[in-house]
Structure formats: structure tokens, C-alpha cells
Image (cartoon, rainbow, N blue to C red):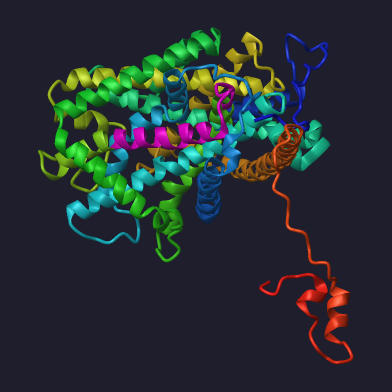
Amino acid sequence: MAAPTSVREETPQRPPSRFTGLITHPRVFLPAAGLLVAFVLVTAAFPKETGDFLAKVNDSVVEDLGWWYIAAVTSFVFFAVWLAASRLGDIVLGKDDDEPEFGLGSWFAMLFAAGMGIGLVFWGVAEPLSHFASPPPGSPAGTPALNARTAMDTTFLHWGLHAWAIYVVVGVSIAYSVHRRGNPVSIRWAIEPLLGHRVHGFWGDVIDVTAVLGTLFGVATSLGLGVSQISAGLAYLGVVDEPTTFLLIALIVVITSIALVSVVTGVDKGIRYLSNINMGVAVALMLAVVLLGPTFFIFSDFVTQVGSYIQRFFEMSFNARPFQEDGKAWLGDWTTFYWGWWMSWAPFVGVFIARISRGRTVREFVVGVLAVPTLVTFLWFSVMGGTALYEQIFGAGGLVAEDGSVSTDTALFQMFDLLPGSAFLSGVALLLIVVFFVTSSDSGSFVVDMLASGGNQNPPVWSRAFWAAMEGAVAGVLLYVGIQAQETDPSVNPLGALQTMAILLALPFSLVMVAMCIATAREMLAEIRVIRREERRLLAQQLTDHVAREVRRGSAVPSRPSRPSWTRGSWRAGRSGSNGSEPSDDADGVSGDR
């Protein structure tokens, strides 16, 4: 397929300025860095006031956003499927002769580690158990088997096609803008077809600053989940007495320092090696649980739940629970949080997978990012969550407390306790969380730095380290705010502040994502129209050349039968003759058996 003439060549780098080598794009870097530093300082100085403010925002704003997030994210699924199923899927994300930079194995490992990471380990057991113990509002009350199916269906909804469709929208829009049209690596350029020259000015800066802030808080949420589970695991295993605030902050500092080492090595070395290690450890842990747990039940559960997910897909996708009294609160804690969390991660994951996807077609990109990770995620939850549900229903139980609560921090380690080799499995899980932590911080800071540097794909090392440190700082102060709120009210979720910020910052970016869908579709359709016109022109030329060759060879070209000698006027004249008779066949030269 030939690229149309409207496709741009590589955009030349901007001329160096006095900031080159220090801050390459101050109009994005300085506002984003300033807002983050101010937020960290204010939150650290006034943790209680910040916690009260976020609680009010959660009650008055977040719980009312459920319908919008549900409509937007479900539309992203349909958009992704349309891209892959239509002729737009043939477009190459790059020049037509570009080959993929990474092999399929490394590509899947990197996008999977960047896309889910710590969340899979944290929620792999905790979410199915939570929905089993407290089914979503409006769910039919029934047997433990029915509750287990509802729990797995809900978990699959939150971690399935919807989550990855969010990444597809941002990733394919940026990949097309960067690799096909030759734009810098920046969110603003994916919306250029709608905003035009305005992306060069204030509104373009606002878009990129929003993406930087959303990414930082999205990654910080994951880091908060990770250190919470690490500290809880250490306490559960008896390594420490209890997960104190000091331990949580110390873990953030230590693991962020480890991440800095990976950050400065660059994507081709640090992230690739860590992602491959990560994937290997995750697969090994999953296989160990399959072999040590209820093996045949796990596979039966996987097959059953995939079918149940397909069967209930539309019902669950559009369910905003308007008739349940506690429906909005439940959505705010679960579905709205997840959709907001995924969207806050979307600039980071989208830019990252766009950068590593040069040379792939749109169809390869969509199928690779949408379908394959979804199936692997379903398998993970069937192994981890399915084993936990089996032990709770048919085994020793004890994973759900008598009051119906589930300890999200320690649920994974409680499940391991019911299997042989629990100490070893717990140790591997802790290692996996740490590596996911490092991978998330590494990838996130690298992408944030690209956005804050005006699309520079090799930003300065010092700024990469700065953003990695800011991710740890944001996670630390928000986790501290949550812990302080829990000390005042034990019913408060210590991760609530992190979740609320992720949802809030995802709201403006959800509008950016809708604009990205429109802009990308418009550009791709225009390219396909150019290609179709060129194909018709070439086909006509080929037919003309073929006929000319045949004529030159003296081949007999069947002649088209001549038209009758009579005309429309003569036919009418004959019908209106003086004698009113029909014209004879002999008169017009047409045989009688016409």
C-alpha cells in the first residue's frame, strides 16, 4: 500500500534554544513540575485538610461521573473493533516498508507489563473475593456458585476489553501521528486534525500538561497499591511486626531508588530486560498455582467465565445501576475508579506502546493490544481468583472474614497459605510486585519526560530521574493522607485519596480521548480515500494498457453490437404516422425477432 501524498515526512527537530540540555520544552515541563511540587508540599504540610477535601470531592463529584465513564469507555471498545475490522486496519504505523522494531515476545511482554503491572498482583485474588463476599448492587442473590460467577464476571469486566480499548485509542492515535505522519511524540499532535494550528500554542500545552499530571497520578496509584501489598506481605510472613507508615514510606524510597537505575539505562535496555524478567516471573508464579492448586477446576472456570463474559458483555458494559440506592457509591469504588484509573494511565501506556509499535499495521496493533492481553488477564484471574474462590467454597475457607470483609492487602498471601510451598510462593509474589513497581516507574517516567520535553524521544537523564522521583513523592504523600484519614475513621480506605485523584484527573483526559478518536478516524479515512482513488486510477491504466497490447498484437477484440439505426425521435415519429401503424422491422433494419 502506498502512502498518500498528504502524509508528512519526518518533522525536523526544533532549533536549539538556551534551555537545550536543561529543559527542552519549558511551556509544558515547568507548569507540570510546578503543580506537582506544589501539590506534594501542600499535601505533606496539610494532610488532614487534603484528606477532607478529597473525601468531599469523592462524594459530590466522583460518584456522579459513573454514567459518563461507562458511555465513553464502552464507545472506545467499539471504536477499536471498527479499526481492526475495517480497511483502516491495513494502514501501516510507519512507512509502508517499515519492519517492527521488537519481536512479538518482547512486544507483548513490554505492553503487558506497562499496561497492568502491579494491579494484577494486588487485585488477582482480592477483587473476585470482594465481589463474592459483597455482590454488586442489583445482582441476584443466590447460591455460592452464582455469587462466584457474578464475582468473576464483574472482575472480567473491569480487566477485560474495556481496559485495553482505552490503551488502544491513545496508542493507535499517537502511533499513527508519530510514525505515519511524522509528528513529535506528544498527545497534542494526535488532535491536530481537529485543533489545527492551535496545538502549537496554549491549548496544545494544556493538553500535554493534563496528560503529564494524569500519568503521574495514575502511576502513583499503582505504586501505592504495590507498597501497601509489599508491607502487608512482609507483616503476614512475620518479617516485620506490622505495616507502619514509616515502613510504607521507606519502601517507596528504596524501590523508587532502584527504579532510577533502570530509568537512566533507557528503554532498549532497562525496560526490555525488566519486562522480560517480569513476564517470566509472572508466568512461573501462575503455573505454580495451577499445578499446586485445583488444576482442572481452574481450566473449567476459565472456559466457563470466558463464555459468561461474552454472554453478559452488553448487559454489564452499559449498566450504570441507576435504580440501586447504593449504585453510585459502588460504581465510584469499583467501575468508575477502574475506568478513571485506566484513563489516567492511558497517556503513559499509549505513548509507550506507540513508541514500540512502529512498523505494525493498525490491525496487528489493535489485535495485539486488545485481544491477547485480555485473554492472558482472564487466565491470570481464573488461576488466582478461581483458586481463592475454590478454597473459600469447597476448601478450608477463611479468606472471607466473618463480617463479610476481605483484606485486599493480604488476600493473595492468605490464598498461598492454603497451598503447598506457601512461603516460597509469597516470596516470588513479593519479588514480582517489586519488579512491576520498578517497571511502572521506569516506563512511566520515561514517557512523562517525552511528553514534558515536547516529544523528544531521548530526553535528558536528569529529567527522567526527576519524574521518577515525583512519582514516588506523589504516591508517598497521598498514601500518608489515606493513612491519616483511616486513623480518624477506621472504615476509610487508606488508598482512597490515590483513587480519587486518579478518577478526577482522568475526567479532562477522557474528553481528549474522544477528540483523539474523531481526529484519528478522520485522518485514516482520508488516507483510505486517497488510496482508493489511486487504486481505481491504476486499475483503469492497467486495463487500458492491456487492451492496447491486445490491439497491437492483432487480436480479435469482440466488437460491441451496433445500436439500432432508429433514434428516439424516429421511433416516436413512426408511432405517430398518418396511418397510426407501428414502424416495420424492415424499415429500421432491425430483425423481426428482436
Left or right: 553 in relation to 213? right
Q: What is the x, y in percent for residue 443?
A: 52, 20
Classify residue 70 as left or right of residue 458.
left
Q: Is residue 5 left or right of residue 440?
A: right
- Location of residue 406 in the rendering, given as x and y in whole percent from the top left corner: 26, 41
- Left or right of 267? Residue 411 is left
The image shows a total of numbered marks equal to: 0
Which stretch appears magenta? 354-381
- Taking 14 as reference, is 570 above or below it? below
Q: Position of residue 266 (x, y in %)?
A: 55, 10
| Foreground pick, 195 / 400 | 195
The residue located at (55%, 53%) in the rendering is 68
Give the answer, above or below, for where 144 lies relative to 117. below
Residue 152 visible: no
**In magenta segment, residue 391:** no
Q: To which quarter of the image does residue 324 belong?
A: bottom left
Outermost residue to the front: 586
Q: Nearer the viewer, residue 341 or 13?
A: 13
At which x and y percent is residue 594?
Answer: 68, 71
Q: Residue at x 28, y 24 (%)?
A: 233
Residue 428 to residue 154: above or below = above
Q: Can see residue 274?
A: yes
Q: Overall secondary structure of the magenta stretch?
A: helix
Q: Is 362 in the magenta?
A: yes
550 or 369, which is in the foreground?
Answer: 550
- Quadrant the N terminus occupies: top right
